Amino acid sequence: MPTRTARTAWNGSLEAGGGQVELSSSKVGTYDVSFPKRAADDADGTTSPEELIAAAHSACYAMQFSALLGGAGGTVEQLDVKADVSLGPDSSDGGFKLTGIVLTVEGEVSGIDEATFLKAADDAKAGCPVSKALTGVEITLNATFVS
């Protein structure tokens, strides 16, 4: 399996500095990052490690879930997956940590019932490689079956 690469060029201090994250493997873009905007409610045109993790998690989960639904006899018409990744204080060392991830999925799948959908949703949460990498963070799942 391939290795994917991203890189960050950073200048200045944490509080006054900033950087650019480059998605090197895909070459799809370079995005600004800064700590003040990372910690603010309004990202104002910058990304953050949390947003990038959310993107990775939602995409990985959608792929894993789709595979499990197909394996259960379902035909995926549409999956809408959102990942909300929260950053907060880490009381153990005074820094920051990921405080939780909420995966929300709504799926239109034919050929299966709601119970099969919900089981596959939960299994995908546990089996997605990004979920496995983030085992130190509480991951919550909200799944809705659309018949």
Image (cartoon, helix red, strand yellow):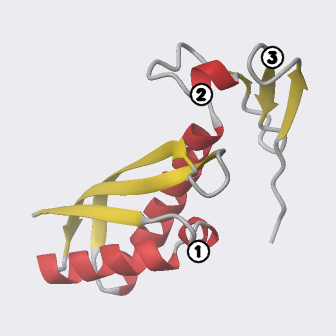
Q: CA distance from mark 2 to mark 3?
A: 12 Å
Tell me: 147 left or right of 142: left
Marks 2 & 3, CB-CB < 8 Å contact: no
Q: Is residue 78 above or below residue 134?
A: above
Q: CA distance from mark 2 to mark 1?
A: 24 Å
Mark 3, secondary structure of its residue: loop
Q: CA distance from mark 3 to mark 1?
A: 32 Å
At a point 44% along the width and 23% down the height, the residue shown is 41
Report the amino acid beneath label 2. Answer: Arg
At a point 87% along the width and 25% down the height, the residue shown is 10
Q: Nearer the viewer, mark 2 or mark 1?
A: 2
Quarter of the N terminus within the rendering: bottom right
Marks 2 & 1, CB-CB < 8 Å contact: no
Q: Nearer the viewer, mark 3 or mark 1?
A: 3
Q: Which of the pair 38/6 is nearer the observer?
A: 38
Labelled disc at residue 17? 3
Place of residue 64 in the rendered image (x, y in percent of width and height, measured from the top left):
48, 71
Residue occupied by mark 2? 38
Report the amino acid beneath label 3. Answer: Gly
Place of residue 75 in the rendered image (x, y in percent of width and height, measured from the top left):
29, 71
Tell me: 104 left or right of 90: left
Crowding at mark 1 (Cα within 10 Å: few <14, some 14-19, many 20+)? few
